[in-house]
Amino acid sequence: MRRRVLVVDDEPAIVDLVRQLLLRRGYEVLTASDGDAALQAIYDFRPDLVVLDLTLPKLSGWEVCRRVKGDQAARSIPILMLTARREERDVVEGLEMGADDYVKKPFSTAELSARIEAILRRSEKERTGKQIHCGDLQVDLENESAALRGAELSLSPTEFQLLEALACYMGEDRVGKTVTRENLLSRVWSATGGDTRAVDVYVSRLRRKLDDGKTPALTIQSRRNRGYRLQWKEEKEKLQDED
């Protein structure tokens, strides 16, 4: 699967320069020109890296960084700051918010490419061996396996990726955030736009495999016109889909 990079800058020339650089190196590239669009793209498409200009309309790059790094579901996404500011304190402020690295404008494409590769290598190492724990559900990212109440689930590679995508949004309140069909289509099938019926089919298959007849039940709840979320339900609670 190609690694996906989101490039955020309000200068079209810079966006095009970085986009062409990344395309030549085999990345999938998404773009945004303001802070609001950047946040939407981050939550919808879960890029592997964000190249983020600090001076943006609507919402500054600092604020985008602060919100992403303050969100448990998104904080693991690395951020490379682009800044035209020369003051050291501006760079320090961004790094203290959780940004992974920075490049000052004007920059060389060689330097930018090297820093992107370095961040992605570190990110991949950090991911290896990690697990997602959601109550009695364990998702092993390194071995691409999952277990429910200690029993290993028999999942296809696509079903595993779908479960991982949903589990990433499971919070301590045992209710996951809603993930749109378009988001799942992008993350699991590396497709943007198009028919989302494949998502519905695989959600139905995965839902059946998660049903072990025990309580609390782990279910994938449908949210009408919104998407799906992973949720633990007690027996006394009536399972209702909004579709």
Image: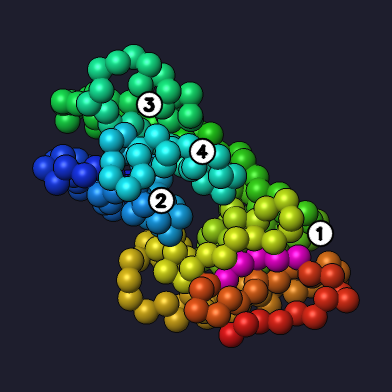
> Among all residues in the image, which is located at the extreme bottom?
243
At 60% from the left and 55% from the top, the residue drawn is 169
Q: Secondary structure at mark 4?
A: helix
| CA distance for labels 4 and 3 | 14 Å
Q: Is residue 27 visible?
A: no
Closer to the N terminus: mark 4 or mark 3? 4
Q: Is residue 7 magenta?
A: no
Closer to the N terminus: mark 3 or mark 2? 2
| CA distance for labels 2 and 4 | 12 Å
Residue 44 on image: x %, y %: 43, 59
Please identify the quadrant where the C terminus is shown. Answer: bottom right
| CA distance for labels 1 and 3 | 40 Å
Residue behind mark 1: 149
Residue behind mark 2: 39
Closer to the N terminus: mark 1 or mark 2? 2
> Among all residues in the image, which is located at the extreme right?
236
| CA distance for labels 1 and 2 | 35 Å
Closer to the N terminus: mark 2 or mark 4? 2
Q: Secondary structure at mark 1?
A: loop
> Among all residues in the image, which is located at the extreme top?
88
Q: Quick one: label 1, few (<14), some, or many (20+) residues within 10 Å?
A: few
Q: Nearer the viewer, residue 120 or 61?
A: 61
Q: Secondary structure at mark 2?
A: helix
Q: Secondary structure at mark 3?
A: strand
Residue behind mark 3: 101
Closer to the N terminus: mark 1 or mark 3? 3
At 37% from the left and 79% from the top, the residue drawn is 195
Viewer-nearest of discs 1 and 2: 2
Query: What's the amino acid at mark 4?
Result: Lys
Q: Left or right of 182: which side holds 213?
A: right
Query: What's the amino acid at mark 2?
Result: Leu
